[in-house]
Amino acid sequence: MSVKLVQRWILAKLRNRQFFSVSELNQAIRPLLNELNNRKIRLLGKSRRELYDELDLPALKPLPLEKYRYHEFKLCRVNIDYHIQLEKCYYSVPYQLARKEVEVRYSDYTVKIFHQNKRVAIHNRLHHSGAYSTQKEHMASAHRAYADWTPSRLVSWSKHFGINTQILIETILNKKPHPEMGFRSCIGILNTAKAYDNEIVEAVSEKVLSLNAYQVKTFRSILKNKTYNKQKPALAVTPQTNHENVRGEDYYRIGGSHA
């Protein structure tokens, strides 16, 4: 209602004037707006400016330092490597929250992680698939975040399949700046391998090592498409030249007996 009143009053005042720019129009509106705000309201005995100073101004708070950004919310389960997965990227939380459920509030610029309504981590948003954001203070000391999963246990499990699988697991763990960051891939590979014969698992592991591609999806893709099979080169079969149906090179010579 107030906006409608202001609009009608100012338009009525300016209805006979012509303007050639927005700046010129704004210069004409400003004094009229001040005049309207300072006019006494008959029923209240006060102007709009006085009511603003008395009622609204004391309740106002400073504008936020950062401009408003749209956020989305999502519940995530923390993996044993104390990272959550969000849009194919990974963000660390304090290692004590492994396997716990957390709330993620994220925008195009930041990722804020909460546990029981308390913020436990904040990261810059990543946009490259497979990227990691790991904060050192989230890591466990001596690389032992969990009593039930350790690098040595994973390597020991891999030995049951064979030397290629063991080398694959050791390679994944050694390539990470912190061993727990490789736990997700190692456990995914070994859990997948349980359903197959050791010979097949070894062949797949050898193929993965040759490709230098250590993701779980690569391991499963090779299994699914059976590209681990080693194709033996086909041997060319040369027919016997003394067969009765083979004429031989002499048959085509000029002046030969059959020419």
Image: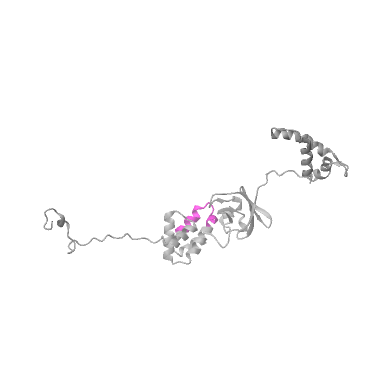
Q: Quadrant of residue 94?
A: bottom right
Question: Magenta segment: does it hold 171?
Answer: yes
- Who is closer to the viewer here, 73 or 79? 73
Q: Residue at x 69, y 33 (%)?
A: 21
Q: Would you place residue 117 above or below residue 197 in this image? A: above
Q: Quadrant of residue 58?
A: top right
> In the current view of this chain or complex, which residue is farthest to the front?
16
- Residue 200 percent across, percent down from the top left: 42, 64
Q: Residue at x 16, y 55 (%)?
A: 252
Q: Residue at x 43, y 56 (%)?
A: 209
- Who is closer to the viewer here, 227 or 216? 227
- Who is closer to the viewer here, 149 or 56? 56
Question: Magenta segment: does it hold 107?
Answer: no
- Magenta segment, principal secondary structure? helix
Would you say 121 lies left or right of 33 here? left
Q: Which quarter of the image is occupied by the C terminus?
A: bottom left
- Residue 224 percent across, percent down from the top left: 45, 62
- Residue 2 percent across, percent down from the top left: 79, 44
Q: Quadrant of residue 242?
A: bottom left
Whether residue 163 is visible here, answered yes or no, is no
Question: How many numbered tags mark residues here?
Answer: 0
Whether residue 36 is visible here, answered yes or no, is yes
- Residue 132 percent across, percent down from the top left: 55, 51
Tell me the magenta residue range.
Answer: 167-182
Would you say 32 lies left or right of 175 here? right
Color encoding of the figure: one colour
